[in-house]
Amino acid sequence: MKKILITGGAGYIGSHTAVELWNSGFEPIILDDLSNSNSGVLDGLESITGKRFTFIQGDCNDLAVLEQISKDHHISGVIHFAAFKSVGESTQLPLKYYKNNVGSLLVLLDWMARQEIKDLVFSSSCTVYGQPEVLPVTEATPRQEAESPYGNTKKICEDILVDYVKSKAPIRVISLRYFNPVGAHPSSKIGELPLGVPQNLVPYITQTAAGIREKLTVFGNDYDTPDGSCVRDYIHVVDLADAHIKALSFLSDKTEPFYEVFNVGSGNGNTVLEAIYAFEKVSGQALNYVIGPRRPGDVVKTWADTTKIREVLGWSPKFSLEDSMRDSWNWQKALGERK
Ligand code: NAD
Ligand code: WQD
């Protein structure tokens, strides 16, 4: 069974990807410093798969940690999720973000070369597109000036990978540009665990519905969109996890240095209000929300053209926006029942 190192594997997307890796016949090896997650996720993973995955608590900026992993395991490939992802915090603490998000990739690439590990899937983001002029967004859409240091770390990491592969480094890389990951595993054993006040829409919706937050504020309804609220491409986290399996399998057939970028989204654009209505429909309860002022820096509308990933990787989304809202709500309720 091929072992795949998942950096940041205790996190939201990493943990869901660990399940899909296992279901696809790979053995996940999870490395996480628990800076934005907790080890309880391993119980959830075991409950879903029946397997206690190997977990190493450590910093993927630490070469010694990586070297110990390659002493203990024969690693066939890497999925690099580990990063800080708060747009707001990145504007306050840019060096923290450059050090971790860019620094960890550099350490990882050095280690992979030493260990002759060739396959890497990198977590990028649609944030590199900024506000696209043409929609839906294709991978050929020029990347825009980053809206935040966080977004810039993703652009820089992509540039590092392009230049490294151009240097004929013995590595095969796919960067996946995620749109808006939402939802949770249908088992409600794992899901998103935002620490503190949620920055993202869907956890804020579910925490409002659970009574943890008093109300949701919709950040503006006077945009040039069907109902005035911003448009996003919400992709179920299990669909997103599956894209990583398809990417790894595609890379394993390659023999030469390789780099490609793929959008991962549902291919649909939905407004904030449509997302709220979808939640109200599946939860059977009205959401307490108000319309407030625009959030500075918000992209008005964006959604993915998924032609390339469908045709090249043979991936397509299976879950709908309502499925995402249902699974997020079930996960929120399961959290509330935890002791
Ligand atoms: P997350 O915070 O839930 O997971 C990231 C994990 O990485 C956390 O468990 C954290 O503890 C760990 N980590 C951070 N720095 C580390 C380090 N130096 N060493 C070891 N572990 C470290 O975030 P997520 O939503 O699962 O995002 C995963 C990746 O996807 C990130 O690279 C993020 O930038 C990217 N991404 C996320 C979104 C989103 O909306 N969630 C969208 C686009 C891209
Ligand atoms: C979605 C929509 C808000 C909260 C962010 C990062 C991006 C990526 C994904 C890491 C927007 C609206 C939200 C609320 C609201 N992360 N909203 N009230 O901003 O599209 O993307 O997460 O890579 O880099 O920027 O996601 O969930 O914050 O917002 O009205 O309380 O919901 O204005 O239109 P966003 P989001």
Image: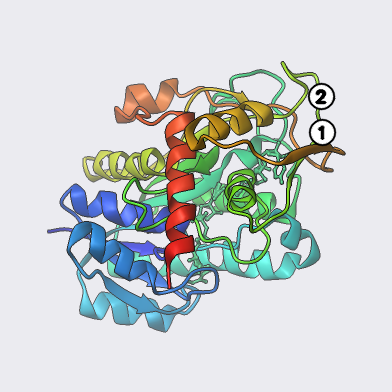
**Marks 1/2: CA–CA distance:** 7 Å
Please report contact status of discs 1 and 2: CB closer than 8 Å, yes or no. Answer: yes
Q: Position of residue 114 (x, y in %)?
A: 33, 70
Query: What amino acid is found at the position of numbered circle 2 in the picture?
Result: Tyr
Left or right of 234: which side holds 150? right
Which colouring convention does the figure follow?
A: rainbow
Mark 2 is surrounded, within 10 Å at the Cα level, by few (under 14), some (14 to 19) or many (20 or more) other residues, namely some
Q: Choose between 44 and 215: the one closer to the eye.
A: 215
- For the question of whether residue 265 can be seen, the reply is no
Residue drawn 54% across and 69% down?
A: 36
Q: Which residue corresponds to mark 1?
A: 220
Looking at this view, name the residue that lies furthest to the left.
1
Left or right of 193: which side holds 42? left
Q: Which residue corresponds to mark 2?
A: 223
- For the question of whether residue 138 can be seen, the reply is yes
User: For residue 303, which quarter of the picture?
Assistant: top right
User: Is residue 178 shown above or below 86?
Assistant: above
Residue at disc 2, secondary structure: loop
Q: Which quarter of the frame holds ligand 2? A: top right
Left or right of 311: which side holds 334? right
Q: Position of residue 174 (x, y in %)?
A: 41, 43
User: For residue 85, which quarter of the picture?
Assistant: bottom right
Residue drawn 51% across and 34% down?
A: 284
Query: What amino acid is found at the position of numbered circle 1 in the picture?
Result: Gly
User: For residue 30, which quarter of the picture?
Assistant: bottom left
Q: Choose between 57 and 286: the one closer to the eye.
A: 286
Residue drawn 73% across and 30% down?
A: 131
Q: Position of residue 4 (x, y in %)?
A: 27, 60
Label 1 within 8 A of ligand 2 by Cβ: yes
